[in-house]
């Protein structure tokens, strides 16, 4: 929805899961010399202040990245994610949180291409300003990310990672994700697609992973993190998930090794847990 501003939620537990997985995907996919295209359908503003503005209203980052910031016992994949956040906090104080585009910029190479789509007018303006001067490998498009995904597939290099993470404030987003993924797999069947979704008490959210699994066929990974018992009134975000189609080889092993520590760090009650399922041929 055009009223949605991700700054309110920057650095929360859902961001931690999403960006932890994104960092690992980019690490794997940039090991080959061939250029990689990274497409972000709902890119947001690029980077967020945690000291002023939207993020300070509910300070959701305190139960997300804030719980990892000073820990010295993190497994290597989680430590890598935190180190990427440190890149936008050079004085060592947690003041800023990078959005997905900034993670992508930090972890890609000169031969790679980044395509960021954002429909919200103010967010897209902020994103464009943030990446002004970033060079030809970065393109910011003020527009619908679902349509943008269709327009850029298949990428010229035939290597691509698409992050699809709408707000889902409008339940029509669930259907839009499925339509976009069906089309994307027909256009570019070998691409890697990472779909984030919220764990909320809504039928569409509960059904989405199985619907994606049916689209994915034989190569997929589904990771979810629950941090708190679902609220009795049926409202609120109690966790989130990432569904990856065509995941890189060995991604599952690294995620599985790190997730118990993430549950320990971010869990808010005894209901905290993770689930990891995958199928790979």
Image (spheres, rainbow, N blue to C red):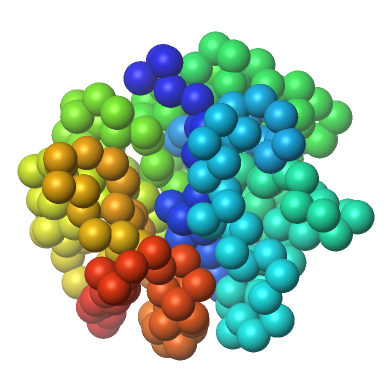
Which residue is rendered at x = 22% and y = 39% of the image?
A: 235
Foreground residue among 281 and 202 = 202
The residue lying furthest to the right in this view is: 91
Give x and y (percent) for residue 280.
Answer: 27, 79
Q: Which of 37 and 26 is in front in this view?
A: 26
Q: Where is residue 194 in the image (x, y as percent from the top left)?
A: 39, 55
User: How many numbered dots are placed on residues in this image?
Assistant: 0
Residue 18, above or below 250? above
Q: Classify residue 232 as left or right of residue 146.
A: left
Point 61% across, 81% down: residue: 74
Quarter holding residue 32: bottom right
Left or right: residue 20 versus residue 31 is: left
Q: Is residue 36 visible in the rendered structure shown here?
A: no
In percent of the image, x 46 and y 66: which residue is there? 266
Q: Classify 56 as above or below 265.
A: above
Residue 33 found in image quarter: bottom right
Give left or right: position of 130 versus 202: right
Q: Quadrant of the N terminus?
A: top left
Q: Where is residue 150 in the image (x, y as percent from the top left)?
A: 37, 33
Q: Quadrant of the C terminus?
A: bottom left
- The residue drawn where x is 31% and y is 46% is 237
Q: In this view, does 219 lie above or below 100?
A: below
Asked whether 204 or 40 is in front, the reply is 204
| Residue 238 in picture, x, y percent from top left | 30, 53
């Amino acid at each position: 929805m055009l009223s949605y501003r991700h700054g309110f939620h920057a650095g929360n537990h859902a961001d931690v899961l999403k960006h932890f997985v994104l960092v690992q995907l980019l690490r794997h996919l940039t090991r080959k010399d061939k250029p990689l295209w990274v497409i972000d359908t709902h890119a947001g503003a690029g980077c967020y202040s945690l000291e002023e503005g939207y993020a300070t209203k509910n300070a959701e980052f305190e139960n997300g990245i804030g719980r990892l910031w000073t820990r010295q016992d993190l497994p290597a994949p989680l430590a890598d994610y935190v180190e990427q956040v440190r890149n936008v906090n050079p004085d060592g104080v947690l003041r800023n949180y990078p959005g997905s585009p900034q993670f992508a910029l930090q972890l890609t190479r000169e031969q790679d291409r980044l395509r960021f789509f954002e429909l919200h007018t103010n967010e897209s303006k902020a994103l464009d300003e943030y990446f002004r001067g970033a060079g030809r490998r970065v393109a910011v498009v003020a527009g619908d990310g679902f349509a943008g995904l269709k327009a850029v597939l298949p990428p010229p290099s035939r290597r691509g990672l698409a992050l699809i993470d709408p707000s889902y404030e409008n339940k029509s987003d669930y259907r839009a994700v499925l339509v976009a993924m069906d089309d994307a797999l027909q256009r570019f069947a070998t691409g890697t697609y990472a779909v984030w979704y919220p764990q909320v008490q809504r039928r569409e959210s509960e059904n989405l992973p199985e619907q994606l699994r049916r689209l994915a066929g034989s190569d997929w990974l589904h990771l979810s993190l629950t941090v708190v018992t679902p609220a009795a009134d049926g409202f609120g975000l109690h966790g989130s998930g990432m569904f990856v189609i065509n995941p890189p080889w060995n991604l599952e092993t690294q995620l599985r090794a790190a997730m118990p520590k993430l549950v320990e760090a971010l869990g808010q009650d005894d209901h905290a847990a993770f689930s990891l399922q995958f199928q790979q041929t």
